[in-house]
Amino acid sequence: MIHLDKEKFRVGMRTTKSGVAVGFCVLLFKLLDRGSPMLAGLAAVFALREDCSQSLHHGIRRVGGNTVAGVLGVTLIAVKDFLGLDFSVDFFGTIIAIIILITVCNIMDMSTAIVGATATFLVVFYNIDDAEKITYAIQRVLDTVIGTSIAIGVNYLLPGSPQTPADNC
C-alpha cells in the first residue's frame, strides 16, 4: 500500500527553481525558433541541485557524458557505414560502445551522467535517420548545455537556503 506523508506536501525552492528553469528553456526555444525544448528541460531538471556549485558540478558531468555518447554514436555509425555490416555492428558495436561509455564516464568522474549518456548514445545510434545523426548528436549536446546553463543561472539568481561563499558559482 502507498503511504502518503502529509508533511511532504509542500512546494520547496528546488521544486520552484526546477519549474522556472524548464519554463525559461521553453521561452528561449520559442524565441529562437529552436524546436522542442524537451531535452534542454530535462537537462535543466537533472542539473538543478541543492546549490549553485552542485548544479555546476552535475551539469558539467552531464554535458561531458552526452558529448562522449554523441562521439561514440557517430563513430559507430561511421564504422557501420564503412564495413557495411549492419547487424554485426549493431550487436557487437553496441556492446562495446556501452562498455566504453560507462568506463570513460567512470574514469572521468562522470558516473552521475551514465544513464543520460547511455540514452543519448542509443537515441543517436538507433532512432535518428542516418543523414541527421551527426547533426542530432551535436544538437543534443547543445540542448544539454542550454538547459544546464539555465539551471545554473536560475539556481544562482533565485533565493534558496543561505549559501556560503564556497557554494556560489
Image: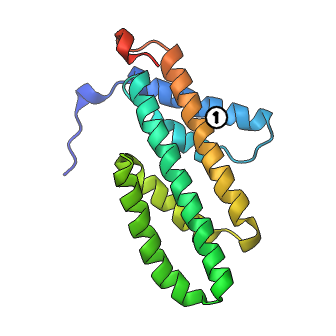
Q: Is residue 138 visible?
A: yes
The residue tagged 1 is 25
The residue shown at (44%, 22%) is 52
Disc tally is: 1
Q: Is residue 145 left or right of residue 52?
A: right
At label 1, counting other C-alpha atoms closer than 10 Å, the crowd grade (few under 14, some 14-19, many 20 or more) is many
Left or right placement of residue 75 versus residue 104 in this view: right
Residue type at numbered disc 1: Cys
Between residues 96 and 45, which one lies in front from this camera angle? 96
Side of 144 relative to 57 (left or right): right
Q: Position of residue 142 (x, y in %)?
A: 65, 44
Residue 38, visible in the rendered structure: no
In the rendered image, which quarter is residue 150 located in? top right
- 152, above or below 40, in the image: above
Nearer to us in this view, 141 or 38: 141
- Report the residue at 67% width, 53% height from top: 138
Q: Residue at (58%, 59%) from the top-left corner?
A: 70
The location of residue 125, given as percent across then percent down, is 59, 70
